[in-house]
Amino acid sequence: MSLSQQQDRQHCFHPFSNYHQLNRDGARVIVKGEGIYVYDEQGNKILDAMAGLWCVNLGYSAKPLIEAAQKQFNTLPYYNLFFQTTHSPAAKLAAKLAEITPAKLNHVFFTGSGSECNDTVLRTVRHYWACLGQPQKQIVISRDNAYHGSTMAGASLGGMKPMHAQGGLPIPGIVHIPQPYHFGEGQGVDVEMFGQQRAQLLEQKILELGVENVAAFIAEPIQGAGGVIIPPDSYWPEIQRICDHYGILLIVDEVICGFGRTGEWFASQTYAITPDLMCLAKGITSGYLPLGAVMVSDRIAQVLQEHDDEFTHGFTYSGHPVACAVALATIEEMEKNHLVEKVRNDIAPYLAQKWLALAEHPLVGEARIKGMMAAIELVENKATLKRYNKTKAAGTLCRNICVSNGLIMRAVGDTMIIAPPLIISKAEVDELIQLAWQCLDQTYAQLTSRTNI
Ligand code: PMP
């Protein structure tokens, strides 16, 4: 066991980990990143088809980002935005974000992470309605199996039952409706009809709660951590109609989907959504430094600006100058290289063509993809789409086989997902797909030999 592994085992608690297992098995030590690959202590080269945690959109060796950080460190390594103070990286990034996000989003509240964005939106929407003399308009409607972060508000807005089970969540005033997960919950129903039905559950919930009590609806355009759940095309137009009709605020959590992942700058453009609030993080700095941003619409900004009292909310690292400088460099790099257009017109269609062919594998019940985020569903029976018994842990087995073959794919139950760096080349897509086939073969061989015992 290496020194890093020893120190880690003795002292480091990891996010979303089983500490019994972690202590027993120790952790893999990553020492280097280059392009779309990471390298571990043993010198293994691993193709990172998850771009870290859906964030390293420009890969691991984007020099302009590193140079931007160095330059800012040398000028002003830290200052904050409290007490009527600002600095040029934050001001410039705010203006840039207002320019590239959808038209009505012209203000930004900086945070340090996606979770902090969601804490911020919860406080913002409640404050907004209070400013308008409707303080009882508190409830935020979210969805089962959504992921909005790990803070108390983030985990409460999220719809992950195991997270709610620890620590008595959700906090009051947050309710959940079912998700638009056709493969998992809509078999036998026409896809578009299913999308409509699931969206209409929002309307039912608003009526049940009373519109006078509902502040907002929050959703990821495509659920990421829940298993790359791509909604039917009918879903978002109906959600938009309902939010508009009842005048409730629409919050889109684009922490994963933003910055080119769906082939537009933002998934709100992909799905023609007009949000009142938009959460951004991850790809905003290509993951190089922690930064989040809540985009605020003119409708909300106007009310907050007319209200002559303090919004009592903020973080030490809101608008950290080095993180903002790296975000500016990230956006500049993406613009200079026409990365979003390349994703939309070239690399995403190429990946789609190869990825969707995985549906032919005997272990795969469905393959789906939107832009540069994709999933396959592992099934025991391809004809009936019956899943493996949970005790088989097919997804975990597949994930472990992937890593030992030099590929990082993530398992969400028995759904295998990818979200590779946006700079991936066609040759690297070929390699990813070839590794995926190989790993599916090995997983299938192990699962079927176990079945036969
Ligand atoms: N929202 C979404 C949609 C996310 O996927 C995540 C992180 N995976 C978060 C919020 C939380 O972000 P963070 O981990 O930076 O707090």
Image (cartoon, rainbow, N blue to C red):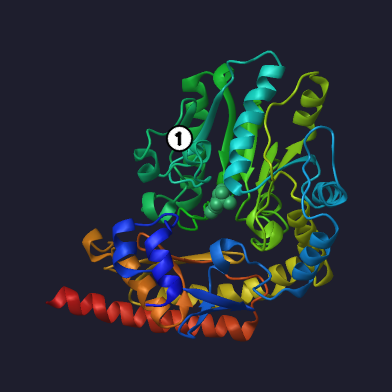
Q: Position of residue 268 (x, y in %)?
A: 68, 49
As displayed, is residue 357 above or below residue 369? below
Q: Which residue is mark 1?
A: 176
Which residue is rendered at x = 79% and y = 70% of the image? 67
Quadrant in which residue 80 is drawn: top right
Neighbour tally class for label 1: few under 14, some 14-19, many 20 plus, Cα within 10 Å: many
In this picture, residue 70 sits left or right of residue 423: right
Front one among 18 and 377: 18
In this picture, residue 301 sits left or right of residue 396: right
Front one among 155 and 319: 319
Q: Position of residue 25 (x, y in %)?
A: 31, 69
Q: Is residue 401 visible?
A: yes
Which residue is rendered at x = 51% and y = 49% of the image? 192
- What type is the residue that disc 1 sits on? His
Quadrant in which the C terminus is drawn? bottom left
As displayed, is residue 369 above or below residue 31? above
In this picture, residue 445 sits left or right of residue 323: left
Front one among 148 and 197: 148
Which residue is rendered at x = 60% and y = 77% of the image? 33
As displayed, is residue 153 above or below residue 305? below
> Disc 1 on helix, strand or loop?
strand
> Which residue in the rendered view is the most extreme toward the top?
133
Quadrant in which the N terminus is drawn? bottom left
